[in-house]
Amino acid sequence: MNPTTENKKLSSEKSLKAMKSFSEKYAKNTNTYFCVDPSVTAVVIEGLAKHKDELGAPLCPCRHYEDKEAEVKATYWNCPCVPMRERKECHCMLFLTPDNDFAGEEQTITQEVLEATRATM
């Protein structure tokens, strides 16, 4: 059975692929790295993809919002959020500067890691 069709809480394959591609390109373009724990990266990418499906934009999945639709319109927390763009500060630990203790050495994530993490969600 496909976990995507079983569990409506997961993102679509299309959005997941788009957010994976975006995340990899953005990391390379900003000289940032994914978390040393690939499951953190996978969960954040899944959250971005889910928000893209539900809200039409990749709203930061690591924050609480009273009104997600209003936050999307404000664009401040749409990934990459303003703190990331201005100061390279990623609350989600998706894009980490090389000096961050949690930064790994990867700017890519395999589809297998994404799928394995999704299977546990």
Image: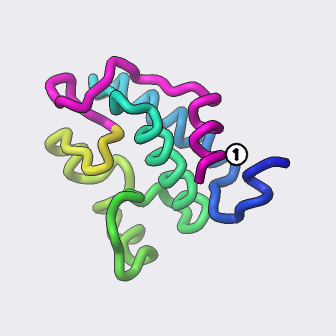
* Magenta span dominant secondary structure: loop
Q: Which residues are magenta?
A: 95-121
Q: Amino acid at mark 1?
A: Glu
* Residue 40: % across, % down: 41, 41
Circle 1 SS class: helix
Relative to 58, say whether 68 is above or below: below
Task: Return the residue nearer the eye: 77 or 97.
Answer: 97
How would you rate the neighbour count of disc 1 (Cα within 10 Å): few for under 14, some for 14-19, many for 20 or more? few
Relative to 44, say whether 6 is above or below: below
Residue 8 quadrant: bottom right
Is residue 117 found inside the magenta-colored segment of the image? yes
User: Hey, which residue is sitting farthest right in the picture?
Assistant: 1
Residue behind mark 1: 13
For the image shown, how many numbered marks are present on the structure? 1
Q: Measuring 55% from the left and 58% from the top, which residue is drawn there?
A: 52
From the viewer's perspective, tell me whether residue 89 is left or right of residue 106. Answer: left
From the viewer's perspective, tell me whether residue 11 is left or right of residue 93. Answer: right
Task: Return the residue nearer the eye: 119 or 53.
Answer: 119
* Residue 92: % across, % down: 32, 48
Is residue 33 found inside the magenta-colored segment of the image? no
Q: Measuring 35% from the left and 74% from the top, which residue is drawn there?
A: 65
User: Hey, which residue is sitting farthest bottom in the picture?
Assistant: 66
Residue 106 quadrant: top left
Q: Measuring 85% from the left and 48% from the top, which residue is drawn there?
A: 1
Q: Measuring 52% from the left and 61% from the top, which residue is drawn there?
A: 51
* Residue 93: % across, % down: 30, 42
Relative to 23, say whether 82 is above or below: below
* Residue 66: % across, % down: 35, 81
